Amino acid sequence: MLLVANGSVFTRNAQTPFIPNGAVTIDGDTIVEVGPERELKAKYPDAEYVDAQGNLIMPGLINCHTHIYSGLARGLAIKGCNPTNFLENLEQQWWKIDDNLTLDGTKASAYATILDSIRDGVTTIFDHHASFCEIPGSLFTIKDAAQELGMRSCLCYEVSDRRGQEKCDQAIAENAEFAQWAAKERRDNDNHMIAAMFGGHATFTLSDETMDKMAEANNGLTGFHIHVCEGMNDVYDSAQKYGCTSIHRLLDHGILGEKTMLGHCIHVTPAEMDIVKESGTWLVNNPESNMGNAVGCAPVLEFFRRGIPVCMGTDAYTHDMLESLKVFLIIQRHNAAMPNVGWCEAMTMLFENNAKMASKYFDRKLGVLEAGAAADVIVMDYKPFTPLSEENIDGHMLFGMMGKNCRTTIINGRVLYKDREFVGIDEDKINAWTMAESKKLWSTLNDRAY
């Protein structure tokens, strides 16, 4: 049993949102009680004490869209890479990386992504993977790394026609096999740490025949996770080849629905928004990546106005969800030329909708500190110099914190990171192996030794 105490507890529970001098009691993988430290310390005298040292105790953060396959790209400069548009960026950089990513490279990428996420207080990730060099077994390889390091993970593989029929069929099979494994694991072993979606790259690299194969292989087992209208490529491709919009294509092939999540959706029409709304489909916004790729600003304020649920992700541009929160607010205000918009949407996306989406897939109450919820708890190094309460915690978080404020991360009741040191994880050994794998990848990409 754990007692996380000696701090201010912000629960994200509307009934008891803020407890100064509070504590969280954990038994196994579940929170059993949240309340004043004095009471809980007396009630659970034998619990292991996790000292927050006067800081903020809060639910773990959730990232609804990331890409483990980019984990070894930090600092990489690929020879001849000088993109002038989004498609060139894919062709000259990201597709070259995933074309050369072996299973060992995939595992190294998973290690790098997960360790950074834990440091930033992220306790759940939704990953969208690609490794066209070695597809079979890739999701299982990521799963092994996630289980080893303790990260709650929902995984999928991005099906695409871009590397031919054999690779496309392998990607479909990998999704189907992993989704079947995850469902059996949940049923037989009550595993709430690993989940599956059915991935697709984007409509401009998916034929009608491939979409039909995806829907048939999935057979209603899980939802889909696909990039939609991130760049204008999707818009042009659907119009020129199929005489309709990207969202219409997904609708026609049975891809939309309450468990499906569409990434980006920057260049969608009002009619497409209506389809998304009526189908119950969810969206996920990735503000920094959209700015970095120069693809535009998603109309998230309009999505909210229409009642479309939108989550927040990073697209692996960062693993810091609070960084994404800040950037979301400023790009929406800049785009609207209004300094009073976006606040409620930002907080709803990160702290409410991400938790709802994660709870769909892991069958646990996530994103909240309350009895019965999953024991995903973080401690943020933050000692305010202005008043702090339930009324203004979001302002403190937006303007006073970053992911690197995280000092302790507990996932599923397992203390993984305590006082800025990993627990039960040999970081140096993992980093050394990851470095060796990154050097192999970089040498392959640039035909030189590192």
Image (spheres, rainbow, N blue to C red):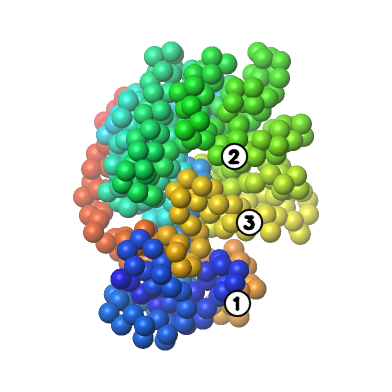
The answer to whether residue 136 is above or below residue 4 is: above
Q: Which residue is mark 1?
A: 389
Calculate the distance from the C-alpha at mark 3 to the C-alpha at mark 2.
18 Å
The three-letter amino acid code for the residue at tag 1 is Ser
Whichever of callouts 1 and 2 sits on the residue coming sooner in the sequence is: 2
The Cα–Cα distance between marks 1 and 3, rounded to whole angstroms, is: 18 Å
Can residue 415 be seen at all in this image of the molecule?
Answer: yes
Q: Which numbered dot is residue 348?
A: 3
Exactly how many numbered labels are in the figure? 3
**Residue 70 screen position, x and y as percent:** 42, 37
Quarter of the image where one finds residue 53: bottom left
Q: Residue at x 71, y 19 (%)?
A: 244
Q: Pinpoint residue 226: horizontal percent, then vertical percent.
A: 54, 32
The CA span between labels 1 and 2 is 35 Å
Helix, strand or loop for disc 3 = helix
* Residue topped by disc 2: 258
Q: In the shown orientation, is residue 39 left or right of residue 336?
A: left
In the image, what residue occupies the spot 68% across and 44% down? 308
Of helix, strand and loop, which one carries label 2?
A: loop
Between disc 1 and disc 2, the foreground one is 2
Dot 3: within a 10 Å radius of its alpha carbon, few (fewer than 14), some, or many (20 or more) residues? some
The answer to whether residue 417 is visible is no
Q: In the image, what residue occupies the spot 35% across and 49% down?
A: 190
Residue 40, x across and y down, in percent: 40, 81
Occupied quadrant, residue 111: top left
Please determine whether, in this image, residue 148 is positioned above or below residue 404: above
